[in-house]
Image: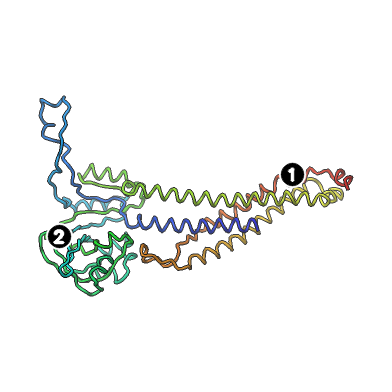
């Protein structure tokens, strides 16, 4: 029973905690590009005084430097996307057009942040469809002037799928967009303002041509290569590139700590179970002193007695491990069927559980190893028992 509950607790803990960590990681990692390329508004690094030979060897300090005038669009965006897509490390390259404006709801204006995307690529690479609570991502591609409206903005304006919403662009143009669905990211501030439209619609709202691209998102086969590749892109193409590790440093730290805690608690459970087995076998030897003496008196050697107790320990580990695996799997399966509904995760209906086969292999191997070492010392003590002393004592 000690092995059974120790192994079962290990499997339940690891399955649930890693499933939960995977869900939380997916909320960030699946939605975040490995490299985000855009033009950043920043002051010029080289000021006019830096070009004056007279002051070249002096300390130069310039205060209140204003940002240099630059366009939001990326220069030669399509050529850049073509070069990036040809790199072996790159899995997908997706363009983006950001547009700002206002939703009109009667006499009220609501802030609007419109993101123009290739919706099918966005669904394929960044799981956009998993956050759509009503409607479908495909409708955005099929319907001209369609919009995937944030659920917060939709509730404020009392809109339904199929309705039309008016939007005012930064240049004062009035556009009428048809709602093809609602999406919910789980962040209320984001859902109140952000919506998705097609790239063509975003370019039309901004009054720009088809070459107008404000952002490029890059997804890699290996996320660990993002920092170095982002530096190479910045130096080679004179754009601002942010890798996923720099953008989510705090999240990465939290995820590592959660994983470390999960393994620490689970291993502790297994070690406690191993000490329980040791105590059980140790006490069993004291109770079986007479039996051990009789075995030795009838011809059993010390090694024979040692093998008996080791075999008993391994049998406890094997049977306890198998029953623990079955119990852990059953409870984990029950947890995975338990309803779990929250506004932050609209598409998740049950608790996340990770049924990784590695947990079950580790559990049975640890059960055998821990029971072997737990039975080793007691079996050595049984081997050294002198039957004459035991029988004389009787």
Residue 315 in picture, x, y percent from top left: 69, 56
Which residue sits furthest front?
107
Q: How is the image coloured?
A: rainbow
Q: Secondary structure at mark 2?
A: loop
Are there few (<14), some (14-19), or many (20+) residues within 10 Å of tag 2?
few
Work out whether residue 228 or residue 244 is closer to the camera in this orientation and state it: 244
> Which residue has dot 2 on it?
210
**Residue at 49% over, 49% down:** 261
Q: Secondary structure at mark 1?
A: helix
Residue 106 in picture, x, y percent from top left: 16, 70
Q: Quadrant of the N terminus?
A: bottom right
* Marks 2/1: CA–CA distance: 81 Å
Q: Which mark is residue 149?
A: none
Q: Which mark is residue 380?
A: 1
**Residue at 32% over, 45% down:** 227
Horizontal side of 7 relative to 72 (left or right) equals: right
The quadrant in which residue 348 appears is bottom left
Q: Can you say whether 224 is above or below 105 in the image?
A: above
Work out whether residue 322 or residue 171 is closer to the camera in this orientation and state it: 171
**Residue at 16% over, 40% down:** 44
**Residue at 28% over, 59% down:** 189
Which residue sits furthest bottom?
162
Residue 354 in picture, x, y percent from top left: 47, 60
Q: Earlier in the sequence, mark 2 or mark 1?
A: 2
Horizontal side of 376 relative to 296 (left or right) equals: left
The quadrant in which residue 135 appears is bottom left
Horizontal side of 39 relative to 2 (left or right) equals: left
State how many labels appear.
2
Q: Can you say whether 35 is above or below 325 in the image?
A: above
Residue 110 in picture, x, y percent from top left: 19, 63
**Nearer the camera: disc 2 or disc 1:** 1
């Amino acid at each position: 029973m000690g092995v059974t509950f120790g192994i079962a607790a290990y499997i339940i803990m690891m399955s649930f905690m890693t499933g939960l960590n995977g869900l939380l990681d997916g909320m960030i990692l699946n939605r975040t590009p490995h490299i985000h390329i855009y033009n950043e508004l920043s002051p010029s690094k080289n000021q006019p005084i830096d070009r004056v030979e007279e002051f070249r060897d002096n300390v130069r300090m310039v205060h209140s430097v204003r940002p240099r005038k630059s366009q939001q669009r990326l220069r030669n965006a399509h050529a850049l996307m073509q070069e990036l897509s040809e790199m072996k490390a790159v899995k997908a390259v997706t363009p983006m057009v950001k547009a700002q404006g206002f939703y009109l709801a009667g006499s009220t204006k609501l802030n609007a942040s419109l993101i123009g995307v290739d919706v099918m690529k966005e669904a394929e690479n960044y799981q956009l469809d998993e956050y759509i609570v009503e409607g479908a991502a495909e409708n955005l591609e099929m319907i001209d002037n369609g919009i995937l409206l944030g659920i917060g903005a939709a509730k404020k304006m009392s809109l339904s799928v199929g309705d039309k919403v008016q939007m005012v662009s930064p240049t004062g143009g009035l556009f009428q967009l048809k709602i093809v669905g609602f999406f919910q990211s789980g962040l209320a501030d984001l859902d109140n303002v952000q919506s998705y439209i097609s790239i063509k619609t975003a370019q039309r709202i901004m009054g720009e041509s088809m070459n107008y691209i404000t952002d490029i998102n890059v997804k890699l086969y290996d996320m660990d290569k993002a920092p170095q590749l982002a530096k190479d892109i910045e130096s080679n193409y004179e754009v601002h590139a942010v890798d996923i590790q720099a953008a989510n440093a705090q999240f990465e730290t939290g995820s590592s700590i959660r994983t470390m805690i999960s393994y620490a608690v689970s291993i502790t459970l297994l070690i406690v179970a191993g000490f329980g087995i040791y105590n059980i076998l140790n006490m069993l030897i004291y109770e079986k002193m007479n039996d051990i003496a009789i075995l030795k008196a009838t011809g059993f050697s010390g090694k024979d007695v040692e093998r008996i107790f080791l075999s008993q320990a391994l049998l406890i580990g094997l049977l306890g491990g198998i029953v623990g695996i079955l119990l852990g799997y059953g409870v984990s399966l029950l947890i995975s069927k338990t309803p779990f509904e929250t506004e932050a995760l609209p598409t998740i209906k049950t608790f996340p559980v990770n049924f990784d086969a590695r947990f079950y292999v580790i559990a049975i191997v640890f059960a055998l190893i821990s029971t072997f070492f737990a039975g080793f010392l007691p079996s050595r003590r049984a081997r050294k028992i002198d039957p004459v002393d035991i029988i004389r004592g009787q």
